[in-house]
Amino acid sequence: MGESKQQKKGGFLNALKGVLYGMASHGNVTAALRTRMHMEHLFMFITLGDMLGIPVLPPYYSLRILPYAVPNIESWKQRVFRERDFTDAIY
Amino acid sequence: MSSPALFVLLALVAYGIAYFAYGKWFDRNVWKPDPKRTTPAHMYTDGVEYFPVTKYVLWGYQFKSVAALGPILGPYIAINYGWAPALAWIILGNFFIGWLQDYGSIMLSIRNQGRSFGPITYEFTGHAGRNTLLGFILFYLLIISATFIYFIALFWHIFPSTFAATVGIILVGVLAGQLLYKVRANVVMTTLLALVLIALVIWAAAAFPFLQTPQGAWPPNPAQGVSAGGIAGEWSLLVWGLIACVILYLASVLPLPQFIQPINYVSFFPTFLAVILILIGALVSGFTGVRLEQPAWVAFNPGGNSPMWPLMFVAIACGSISGWHSLVSSSSTAKQLDVETDAHPVGAGAMLSEGLLALASLAAYMIIPREQLTGSVGAWVAGAIKFTAPFLGGEAATGFLRAYFGVVLILYALTVQALVTRFWRLVSTEVFQGPLSVLGQKHVATFIGLLVPLAFAATGSWNNLWLYFGGSNQLLAGLALMLITIHLARTKAPTIYTLIPATFMIVTTISAIAWQVVKVYLPAFLGTTPTLVQFPFNQYPAFARAMDGIFVLVGVALFILGLVMAFRTYSAYAAAGRPPGAAPRVSMGDD
């Protein structure tokens, strides 16, 4: 008998807590979750998009920076593929 | 019968019958919710948009999302016809239409994979239907914004202590946000600190004259001469509106946790407390000696140009039925419903609770003498004080209560308008593509979404703007009911219980918008009646004429888009191919 009263009291308090949380914070919580969702979407698109069969964003950004990169490509290739050893680290 | 308590009790009984008797019967015969059927919250659980929460949380969320200025200020216009018709519409509208729409919107969404109204409209009425709805919502948002910006400005003006209180509460909200998100302070302690600070801010705004804004005319009546003074004299409406727009701009472009989210959070407590206090005040009015001052009946067409049908039915925006609720129900609530049987307490329960708020607000106007009521929509504050002062400190507390209830009105308008401005920005990004994509840019969209409504607010008359807002809002509700009806027809369930309310709402709201265009704005534009543009802008006849013309165009756009949307939904209903009211041939199921 006492136990069921306890449960009822707990149930009522939980309901009250739920209503208060729903009114005061639930909208904010879901908004925060959605904000994180959008950030995660961007992260996945940009970093793994092409690997996941969405070849849109990485090539898009590549194309956007291509005009700025073209003048440097030749010299960049030379630098990257040049043989290096520890003696190159000496002034 | 001399106090409003009896009418509030009568409505409570009516709402009880609507919820328990009609609601249960409706469930048994129409929706047939099944607690064993998997809801989208379980089917598509992602922990972000789709996840189950209890009906208590959802009821709280739904009520908070739908209860705002609509049910508080709408009865102010409705009481012009007498309190009896307004009371009848609040009770009957909720009983036969309001809760069916909110509940039906949730059920419609959960029976369609938790999708919101855009995709459902696309499925039922096609690409053109969805675009029409989008266009309609754009105009709807502009009108809501104009109305709410006007009210924020108006309340700052007529309640001198509320501007300092509003700024103080905004600062408290920002401080609470910093404590919660940067310092990681305890939520309960931060909340308590914020509430103490809010109480202090309101008390200070009421107690210290230097925190109260000087009063000027609003806008002054040219017939009585120009009384300059106050904030920028006769331009005060525009100045207050601009200040409101600056705050709303920040709310729209700043990250949610930095500004509007904590402000919303700390604002919830005083605003909800006000609702509770008014309800208590109305219920105990028989003991506190508060008496009815308004007549039960005035006239069907007081003033000769505002017939009860259709205008009163759109004036009580949200108090009886509201299209905004269908957007809330289908965008968030339906995605988080644990079991189907929770839809009834959440949807119907929240709507009927809002009906109660409308009723308490109507009661607050009922106890104000007619001569005090005329011309001041802020009379709600006077009614609220009259209701609550007897048990909150009497005459000594009047100054504090005036500042408190006044700032509550502003917070309702400000927090909802911040949401609307942000929503406008997001919709603009979707709408304006290609060469117009600059209009969807964050700052540009926000600027347009505030500038146009500010122009409307600063020049237009509030009650005509309100009727446009009510018309478009209730029309959206009618369209939502039609979408629900189409789904019911497709699933071979009885449709007559939603088809008749939908038809009534669509016919009423389209008529109301047409009336506003043809009988109010068009004569002003053509010069057969005085311009509706307010002083001081009416001193520039060409500009005033142009603004009257723009209001005509807005009304025509709402009318045409609403009519096209209605036609598409009725066509889709006809295509579903069932006569209304026939007995269901098969049991309900998913599409």
Image (cartoon, rainbow, N blue to C red):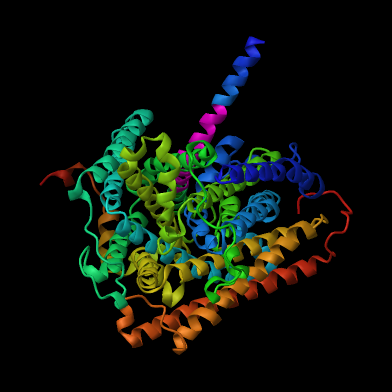
The spot of residue B56 in percent (x, y) is 58, 35
Q: In the image as oriented, which residue stretches furthest toward the top?
A: A2
Would residue B154 appear left or right of B103 to someone viewing this image?
left
At 53% from the left and 30% from the top, the residue drawn is A16
The answer to whether residue B217 shows anywhere in this view is: yes
Q: Nearer the viewer, residue B218 or A30?
A: B218
For residue B580, above or below residue B168: below
Task: Tell which of B338 and B455 is nearer to you.
Answer: B455
Residue at 56% over, 48% down? B354
Residue A11 image position (x, y, % from top left)? 60, 24
**Residue B242 horizontal side relative to residue A16, left or right:** left
Residue A17 magenta-drawn? yes
Magenta stretch, overall SS: helix
Numbered-mark total:
0
Front residue of B286/B363: it is: B286
Residue located farthest toward the left when viewing the structure as drawn = A91
The answer to whether residue B399 is left or right of residue A55 is left
> Which quadrant is the C terminus of chain B positioned in?
bottom right
Residue B489 lies, in percent from the top left, at 79, 60
Viewer-proximal residue among B318 and B218: B218
At horizontal 50% and vertical 56% (from top left) the residue drawn is B70
Residue B178 versus residue B545 in the image, above or below:
above
Residue B335 visible = no
- Magenta part of the chain: A14-36
Residue A34 among those drawn in magenta = yes
**Residue B589 at x, y = what percent?**
79, 49
